[in-house]
Amino acid sequence: MLEVRGLQAFYGPAQALFGIDLEVHAGEMVVLQGLNGAGKSTLLKSLMGLEVRTRGSVRWQAPGTAAALDISAWPAYQRARAGLGYVAEDRRLFSALSVRENLRVAGGSRCEARMAWVLKRFALLEPMLDRPAGLMSGGEQQLLAMARTLMTSPRLLLLDEPCEGISPLLVESIRDALVALRHEGLALLVAEQNRLVVQAADRELHLLAGTVEHLH
């Protein structure tokens, strides 16, 4: 589904990733681990076409398509249209808008049907539909950020530290939602240290100073 070969990433002249190889398949959850500064966030941004300059090959084959495409030069909006979804560590919600409005912003023409699908998987959000995002807890905002990205119907979900600083109860909700999405055939690449999420993964990818340390 996703195949990355020799990926390098740069912030100006400074190199942050050094020849990353990885694959993520449909219905698989791969967890990225590593210390702060190891390159986890940079890797996710590179795959989404955000903020960094890259070299190497990123190939993507959406379910039902005949062949993989090299998307290395595609802008972020084109990758999103092709089926990649990204949830940033800072969530990037519209704080003055309600939960419902945040979901509708991403929903497009299938908004209401898609919203019903999303709310079945994030039931904790349903009683909060009219609440401004800025009045939600950090964990509730994280659920909303994930739900909003799912409104775009991605086939690969890239998540950057979804459980950081969140209560154990909401961590369990996020873990359960990720497992359910995986069972529905989504591919998941998650930068995360929380053991509940790591234990639910199919594989772990360890990064060390911008390189792959080991994969199992």
Image (cartoon, grey):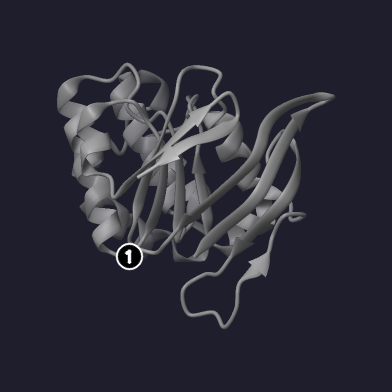
Question: Looking at the image, which is closer to me, 141 or 104?
Answer: 141
Q: Residue at x 29, y 55 (%)?
A: 181
Quadrant in the rendering for residue 31: top left
7 versus 4 height, above or below? above
Q: Residue furthest right?
A: 13
80 versus 48 height, above or below? below
Q: Residue at x 58, y 33 (%)?
A: 211
**Kind of residue sitting beneath label 1:** Gly
Q: Is residue 178 left or right of residue 77?
A: left
Q: Which residue is drawn at 52% across and 50% down?
A: 22
Q: Can residue 93 be seen in this view?
A: no
Q: Where is residue 41 in the image (x, y as percent from the top left)?
A: 55, 30
Question: Looking at the image, which is closer to me, 181 or 194?
Answer: 194
Q: Name the residue under label 1.
A: 185
Q: Position of residue 88 (x, y in %)?
A: 51, 33
Q: Is residue 120 visible?
A: yes
Q: Is residue 203 left or right of residue 51?
A: left
Q: Position of residue 8 (x, y in %)?
A: 71, 39
Q: Where is residue 52 in the image (x, y as percent from the top left)?
A: 73, 34
Q: Residue furthest front?
A: 214
